Image (cartoon, grey):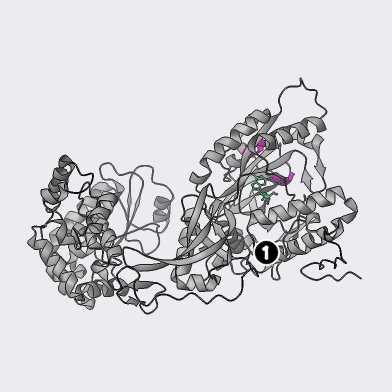
């Protein structure tokens, strides 16, 4: 009796044989694939990159094609993976949800092989005209079936095993992009829309950043994050995960005059209000497909979401019907992949990088690996907790991911490949750059160097931060020059910048006298600045441009800010305890106050004013405004600034708590909502009048 469990059967022993028989190879592959699939889908802990899984899968598929008798009913090739979780109601798909065959070949051969197959199946002669294809993106997310009855979304289900999926309607309803009701007049009695739920890269990064801040588990990649969210039993959690959707096909339909082409179907879906990617085309013949594959390949990194390839579909639905299916794959469609954005490599060491704010980041030094189009030699491990959570140690084989412009990162260790004993990584007690103590604030995950402006690592970054356009705007003071100045020992602190003379600068390597003069001029010019720019330029943790502006408006002068207690700081709008403490700690350091004094002594100046009035006494304090439509003279930002300067708040949506709605032309649903809630409505003139009236009664 063959023993079978969750991980599939074990490979039979190979008595004396050096090379495993095809049967043994197939058994080994099956058991490996079962194991990896279990880790991936059930435990949510992938152990190998997708490309590696695909390779194993392909090897098994090839083996089974050569030796059909080796095909077992439980072979991973015989089913579409996925498991109905406890807690979701099963949904039977009237039209099964299939998968597509994958070509990984080079752009030309992959497309040509598909086109040749289609032509052969259709028994076309060589001189028959080129076939028309719909070419689109292969989104990297989770397949979903949306069922609309009389235009209303009644059910959403995952693919599951292709025959039966899970009812995830509640979670899918939280995706704002998915219409709950279709647009248009002539709606089908039944329309099942198939598409991909995915997560944009920026949303994914932000989500992981949030997870990291809360010390919660981060997600391996956008697809995992999306799939995890859709299969959350608690819809309120799904609602907090930023998901997106693209439609790419159909399931069951009833009572619909269906278009005759796939591209026509997608146009119709878009007209119904469903999100359909604009990155698609109708291509002719293999050449058209190759061109599409190439064009998208060149732009892959700049797309806002991950794709793992493109999909080619025979455009005519009549031809699709003629081509039909082989087992679980249509003959009329193929996925053509791009090189993987995840690869395996080895960790050769773990280094520490010190950032501008002194944050210590552990970075894995890697055996060079080509991934996502570049050779990667370093990948971030974020912080000690991430590193521990992922259990990364020197010598480990790890999955490295690089997608888009995102910094390469180690997403996980390949289980069971650790060589002998390796001690656990520890954070150094002293900064590797300046030797100062390393500290970690309570409740924070990051370790930091306490060397502040003394630490060479922070010194360079501090200078760059100070000089940037949004701060002191010292033109010409960029990376290279800062390196030269700091490495040459010419500048150690911010004030020393202003003591650089023409002589010293012109003596620098590769510095022409003209450029030296330009820099001297730029430094001179930068001395006349504003308080918000200066404050922002100091590089106080948690003090960005907006906070710097708030602080400047509130206190009016630097001395009042330097002397403000935490309580006084907390009175500033949008300043919470973390920011308040950070500011207080910064100015508690004698050397930081010295820097400010010295900068002033060097002639850095800005206008100051009296402290702002107590916010409680401003005319619009306690009032909430909602802006909608286009105002005749004020831009939205200007109107917002006016209201906020008067102490009011501007909100994004209308509720019972809204004090006034300010409406311009083309005001939409917000105006209607205001009317229905009896919220007073003002035009621009009305807003101005209210402002004047309010300030008049004030004074
Ligand atoms: S068509 C009968 N089109 O790829 C054809 N699938 O193996 C059914 N996918 O998980 C699929 N982008 O969710 C199709 N533009 C696209 C797609 C796409 C991504 C996914 C699909 C499924 C897998 C197919």
Residue furthest top as drawn: 127
State which region is magenta.
250-266
Q: Is 207 located above or below residue 581 in the figure?
A: above
Q: Position of residue 669 (x, y in %)?
A: 44, 50
Asked if residue 487 lies left or right of residue 289, the reply is left
Residue 258 highlighted magenta (yes or no):
yes
Residue 320 visible from this viewpoint: yes
Residue 189 visible from this viewpoint: no
Q: Quadrant of residue 568?
A: bottom left
Residue for point 58% across, 63% down = 398
Q: Does dot 1 land on a helix, a strand or a loop? A: helix
Residue for point 56% across, 42% down = 277
Q: Is 302 located above or below residue 242 in the figure?
A: above
Residue for point 88% across, 51% down = 68
Q: Nearer the viewer, residue 521 or 584?
A: 521
Residue for point 16% across, 45% down = 516
Q: Quadrant of the N terminus?
A: bottom right
Asked if residue 61 lies left or right of residue 502, the reply is right
Q: Position of residue 600 (x, y in %)?
A: 10, 62
Q: Quadrant of residue 283?
A: top right
Q: Nearer the viewer, residue 377 or 337?
A: 377
Q: Which residue is mark 1?
A: 41
Residue 418 highlighted magenta (yes or no):
no
> Does any atom of ligand 1 lie closer than 8 Å to the CB of label 1?
no
Q: Position of residue 549 (x, y in %)?
A: 22, 60
């Amino acid at each position: 009796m063959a023993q079978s469990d969750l991980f599939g059967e074990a490979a039979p022993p190979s008595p004396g044989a050096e090379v495993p028989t095809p049967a043994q190879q197939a058994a080994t592959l099956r058991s490996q694939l079962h194991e990896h699939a279990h880790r991936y889908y059930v435990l949510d802990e992938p152990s190998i990159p997708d490309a590696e899984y695909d390779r194993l899968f392909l090897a098994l598929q090839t083996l089974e094609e050569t030796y059909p008798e080796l095909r077992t009913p439980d072979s991973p090739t015989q089913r579409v993976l996925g498991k109905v979780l406890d807690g979701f109601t099963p949904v039977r798909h009237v039209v099964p949800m299939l998968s597509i065959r994958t070509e990984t070949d080079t752009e030309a051969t992959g497309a040509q092989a598909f086109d040749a197959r289609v032509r052969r199946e259709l028994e076309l002669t060589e001189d028959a005209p080129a076939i028309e294809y719909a070419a689109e993106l292969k989104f990297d997310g989770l397949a979903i079936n949306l069922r609309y009855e009389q235009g209303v979304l009644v059910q959403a289900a995952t693919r599951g095993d292709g025959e039966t999926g899970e009812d995830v309607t509640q979670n899918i309803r939280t995706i704002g992009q998915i219409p709950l009701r279709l647009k248009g007049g002539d709606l089908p009695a039944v329309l099942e829309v198939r598409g991909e739920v995915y997560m944009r890269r920026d949303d994914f990064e932000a989500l992981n950043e949030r997870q990291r801040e809360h010390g919660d588990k981060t997600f391996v990649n956008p697809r995992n994050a999306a799939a995890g969210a859709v299969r959350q039993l608690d819809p309120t959690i799904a609602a907090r995960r930023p998901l997106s959707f693209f439609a790419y096909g159909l399931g069951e339909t009833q009572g619909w005059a269906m278009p005759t082409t796939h591209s026509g179907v997608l146009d119709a879906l878009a007209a119904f209000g469903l999100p359909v990617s604009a990155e698609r085309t109708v291509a002719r013949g293999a050449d058209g497909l190759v061109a599409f594959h190439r064009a998208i390949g060149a732009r892959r990194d700049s797309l806002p979401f991950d794709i793992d390839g493109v999909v080619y579909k025979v455009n005519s639905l009549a031809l699709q019907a003629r081509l039909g299916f082989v087992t679980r794959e249509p003959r009329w469609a193929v996925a053509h992949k791009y090189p993987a954005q995840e690869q395996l490599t080895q960790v050769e060491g773990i280094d520490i990088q010190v950032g501008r704010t002194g944050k210590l980041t552990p970075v894995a030094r890697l055996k060079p690996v080509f991934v996502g189009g570049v050779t990667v030699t370093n990948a971030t491990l974020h912080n000690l907790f991430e590193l521990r959570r992922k259990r990364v140690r020197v010598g480990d084989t790890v999955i490295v991911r690089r997608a888009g412009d995102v910094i390469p990162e180690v997403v996980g260790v390949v289980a069971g490949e650790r060589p002998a004993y390796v001690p656990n990584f520890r954070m150094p007690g002293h900064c590797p750059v300046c030797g100062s103590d390393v500290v970690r604030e309570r409740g924070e995950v990051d370790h930091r160097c306490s060397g502040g402006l003394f630490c060479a690592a922070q010194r360079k970054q501090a200078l760059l931060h100070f000089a940037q356009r949004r701060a002191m705007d010292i033109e010409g003071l960029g990376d290279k020059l800062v390196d030269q100045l700091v490495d040459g020992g010419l500048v150690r602190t911010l004030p020393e910048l202003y003591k650089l003379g023409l002589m010293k600068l012109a003596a620098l390597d590769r510095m022409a006298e003209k450029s030296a003069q330009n820099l001297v001029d730029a430094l001179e010019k930068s001395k006349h600045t504003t308080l918000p720019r200066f404050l922002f330029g100091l590089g106080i943790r948690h003090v960005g441009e907006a906070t710097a502006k708030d602080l400047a408006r509130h206190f009016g002068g630097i001395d009042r800010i330097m002397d403000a207690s935490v309580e006084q700081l907390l009175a500033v709008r949008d300043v919470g305890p973390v920011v308040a403490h950070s500011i207080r700690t910064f100015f508690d350091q004698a050397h930081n106050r010295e820097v400010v004094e010295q900068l002033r002594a060097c002639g850095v100046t800005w206008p100051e004013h009296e402290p702002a009035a107590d916010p409680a006494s401003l005319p619009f304090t306690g009032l909430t405004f909602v802006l909608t439509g286009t105002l005749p003279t004020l831009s939205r930002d200007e109107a917002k600034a006016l209201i906020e300067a008067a102490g009011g708040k501007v909100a994004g949506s209308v509720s019972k708590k809204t004090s006034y709605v300010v409406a311009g032309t083309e005001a939409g649903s917000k105006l209607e909502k205001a009317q229905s809630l009896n919220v007073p409505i003002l035009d621009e003139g009305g807003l101005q009048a209210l402002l004047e009236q309010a300030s008049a009664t004030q004074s």
